[in-house]
Every structure is written in C-alpha cells, then in structure tokens.
Amino acid sequence: MFTGIITGVGRIVAADDLASATAVAEGPSPSSYGKRLTVEAPAAYLDDVGLGDSIALNGACMTVTGIDAARQRFTVEISAESLDKTAALGEPGRINLEKALRAQERLGGHIVSGHVDGVGRVTHFSPVGESWTLRLLAPATLGKYLAYKGSITVNGVSLTVNTIADSPDGTEVSINLIPHTVQNTALAELRPGSRVNLEIDLIARYVERMLTAPSPTQKGSA
C-alpha cells in the first residue's frame, strides 16, 4: 500500500526489452514482451531498499529486482500488459517514486494501492497566482468514482478534485497544485496532451460494489 506522498523523483535511464534475440527471431515482436527498467534514484534513497521491495513508479506498484547501490540505481521488470495499461513507463524520463507504506508511518495522503485504473490526458496546465491549475480528462468509465473534494492519484501523487465536468468524451477534473507539489514531483513536466496514470479512491470501489452487487437469496425466506 501507498499514500500518494512522493518520497523522491527519479529517472528511468534505460528501458530494455525482456525478450532475448532468439525469442524475437522465433516468436512475437518485441512489443509483445515487457521491459526491464533501470531507474536512477536520489542520493541515499536506496539505503533501506532490498530485493523484492515494492516501489511505485508514477503510481504503478513495481517489485525491485536488482539494486546497484554504488550508482544509486535499481531495476524493475514490467509486463507488456502493464505497459499497455499505463503511461510513460516504457521510455526514459523523470518519474515520481514512493516506497511502500510501513505500518507505523503516517498516512499523509490517502490509501493508494498502486494499481492504475486508467490513463488520463492533461487538457490544461498553467500557473494561477502562486499555485498551478491542472485539468485532465479521465476516461468515462472512471467518471462515477470522481467526486468534488474527493481524492485522486495522478502519476502517483495524492490530489484533491476541485471541479468535475462530465462529457461524452470523459470526465474533466480540475486540480489545484501548491508550489511544493510542483517543485518536489515530476508533475512540473506535464503539458497539455501529456498522458497520466490515474487511480481512483479505494473506498469508492467498495461503495460501488456494495451498491451494485446482487443480494444473495436468503434460505428459508417465504
């Protein structure tokens, strides 16, 4: 589990196909395979990280498969399915990092699972006074989970929804970013048209299930 509070900004420095040359020659194209990502982390970030630990990359939970402490780098392996269902994880670039939540730590953001529910698109990003306004279009299938003053995770960052506007193309949400968030995450690099990973509030999923699941037939009822 995670909180949506970014603990470091890293960089994907390499994205290598997991398929071997033999597999490519004899089987599907490289796009059918996953990738091994090499991520450069901030200084001392990996001091308490071990093999098998979970780290969220732009909101997507990944397992650490290799550590190069001397170069402050770690590797993860991401499947073709995950690459298809997420944004900006198959190529070099800056990314938000968050280590998995420890039981004794504060829940500073909201409960985040690290499972991307959909990919949104930035429609507007500009400064307003000392803050920034971020508007993005979420897939229509996620619209029912978004609420005024509710929580949403954007590229791993826990944020609060300020406005909602439904349309046939999806649901546009407006979010206010304080300077600290812009300065300490990779959200500063977003531009109109950027694709972003979205995770809806965990509680909303359970509420929908409770409201839509069929009631079991009670034994002995008349």
Image (cartoon, helix red, strand yellow):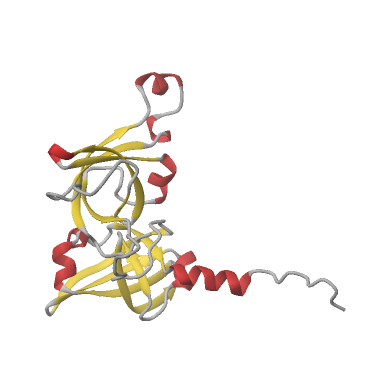
Location of residue 174 by image quarter = bottom left
Location of residue 184 by image quarter = bottom left
Please report the residue visible at 45 percent of the width from the left and 19 percent of the height from the top.
26
Location of residue 32 by image quarter = top left
Relative image position of residue 7 (x, y in whole percent)? 22, 59
Outermost residue, front direction? 104
User: Number of numbered discs present?
Assistant: 0
Relative image position of residue 179 (x, y in whole percent)? 14, 72
Please report the residue visible at 28 percent of the width from the left and 74 percent of the height from the top.
175
Relative image position of residue 59 (x, y in whole percent)? 33, 57
Q: Out of 153 and 46, give the one closest to the viewer.
A: 46
Please report the residue visible at 44 percent of the width from the left and 43 percent of the height from the top.
81
Relative image position of residue 10 (x, y in whole percent)? 19, 50
Q: Out of 98 and 14, give the one closest to the viewer.
A: 98
Please report the residue visible at 12 percent of the width from the left and 49 percent of the height from the top.
43
Whether residue 168 is visible:
no
Whether residue 221 is visible:
yes
